[in-house]
Image: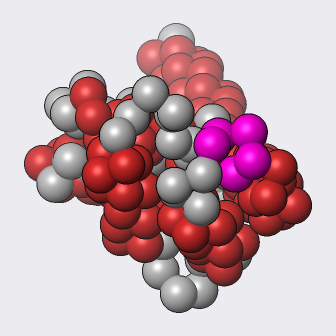
Amino acid sequence: MPPSASTRYEEYSKSEVAFIEAELKDWFLSRRFAMERNMALKNALDAGNFTGLSIANAELPAAQKVLWSDLVQGRPELEDTLSTNAKAMKVDMYMKTFKDSTDLDHPCRIPGSQYLQCVQEGFKEKAQVRQTKCLPTFNTFDACRKGVLQQQAAAMENAMVKQDIMDRRAKALFERRSILLDTRAC
């Protein structure tokens, strides 16, 4: 005698619940692994006083935060109120910070180095003269920085969309699992 419809449905719902639970477990483990990996990376970078383009490291010393902010968002410049030695030190700090934070393949390495080299060569001049002389190289460097920031924003948006899709799928699976378990219990 063939199995009844209720028996077939019972077998079907058991196998579907098992499939859904495996999918939910995979989703949970993927999210958990990603979270732990990202936290470990953040802690390692924070311990080394690394900061990203958003300058989100609270432990970063104030002097480095200002230098990094100028390199990422502002304009690395030397104030006329500084002594000649202080200007030379500041531009050297800009150069060191920039070169230490970009590898040779970084798209802004060359334009940034050219701008900072222009500032370094004209550190004895007045700020107005130096700005006029270095403006073309700064514009190229600034366009490159903005491009990198746009790439980062697009990558972040993509990652958030993918994560949201995965989370919504997991929510739908969880709801389907609840429905199947409720109908099995009846």
| In front of the other: 144 or 161 | 144
How is the structure coloured here?
A: secondary structure
Q: Is residue 141 left or right of residue 44?
A: right
**Residue 5 lies in the magenta stretch:** no
Q: Residue 3 location, x and y as percent?
A: 64, 51
Q: Main secondary structure of the magenta part?
A: helix
Q: Is residue 129 left or right of residue 20?
A: right
* Residue depicted at x 53% and y 21%: 178
| In front of the other: 42 or 103 | 103
Q: Is residue 13 left or right of residue 47?
A: right
Q: Residue 31 location, x and y as percent?
A: 41, 45
Q: Is residue 5 visible?
A: no
Could you tell me which quadrant the N terminus lies in? bottom right
* Residue depicted at x 51% and y 42%: 78
| In front of the other: 101 or 150 | 101
Q: Is residue 158 left or right of residue 177?
A: right
Residue farthest along the left direction in this orientation: 47
Q: Quadrant for residue 128, please give it.
A: top right
Q: Is residue 113 above or below residue 139?
A: below
Residue farthest along the bottom direction in this orientation: 104
**Residue 129 lies in the magenta stretch:** yes
Q: Is residue 143 above or below residue 24?
A: below
* Residue depicted at x 47% and y 80%: 103
| In front of the other: 65 or 79 | 79
Q: Which residues are magenta?
A: 126-130
* Residue depicted at x 53% and y 87%: 104
